[in-house]
Amino acid sequence: MVRKKKGKVRRTPSGRLTLWDRKMDASTYSAILPRVKPLAIKDVRMYQVAHEDLITLVKSVIMKYGTEYVRIYGYLSYAEKIWKAKQHFSSKALQLEADAQFLYWLARGYYEDILREIAKKLGVEISSWSILLERIGLAEEVIYKGTKRALQETLHGVEVNLTDTQIEYDPQGNPVKITTKDIVTGKTKIIHLEYDAQGNVVRIWEEWA
């Protein structure tokens, strides 16, 4: 016997509103709540204990970074995401989820060292930049060449503009700090460079003083 195909149910705005109104009815909740509340208490109790521990953990990390304390709630949200990921994932899946959260909060302007340390204290080691870049399709060589070209253009611009410039080098002879002062406006731009063990540029950031 051939089964008849079930007709598709088309939801309309008014239909969704009616369904929502039924779900929100007090009599519905009064019938469901006594059954689900005892089941939820255990999870709520566990989360509250964990939440208190997360607050203590985050405070212990950011206290070392001074001004970052004003963004404690952002770092706490990040810590909660990592903690929840540990409850649902393991192994490679956990690593991918933790790395994704790290990149998201880093893109929002949160401090890399703090994000890494929080994750580490929760038992998750965030992947190195070489792995992160490879995962999103950016080869290290491409990043290095692009950064090197940008650095050369910056140094050329400094030379042409005749600004007061100071360059600090590490023991291997790599420039690690370029301080450029505009003689006319008095503004100072500081470029920081970070290298890996092979001497490749892995990070550049700027600040104005």
Image (cartoon, rainbow, N blue to C red):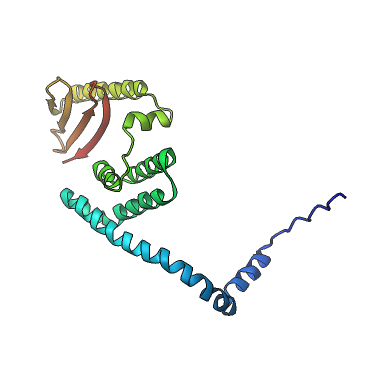
* Quadrant position of the C terminus in the picture: top left
Residue 160 placement (x, y as % from top left): 20, 22
20 or 116, nearer to the observer: 116
| Relative horizontal placement of residue 198, taking residue 103 as reference (left or right) | left
| Relative horizontal placement of residue 121, taking residue 47 as reference (left or right) | left
Quadrant in the picture for residue 101: top left
Residue 71 placement (x, y as % from top left): 26, 54
Give the residue at x 62% y 73%. 22
Residue 126 vs 78, above or below: the answer is: above
Residue 179 placement (x, y as % from top left): 15, 31
104 or 205, nearer to the observer: 104
- Total tally of numbered discs in the picture: 0
149 or 3, nearer to the observer: 3
Give the residue at x 64% y 68%. 19
Residue 117 placement (x, y as % from top left): 25, 44
Residue 118 vs 126, above or below: the answer is: below
Quadrant in the picture for residue 199: top left
Give the residue at x 23% y 36%. 206
Residue 95 vs 202, above or below: the answer is: below
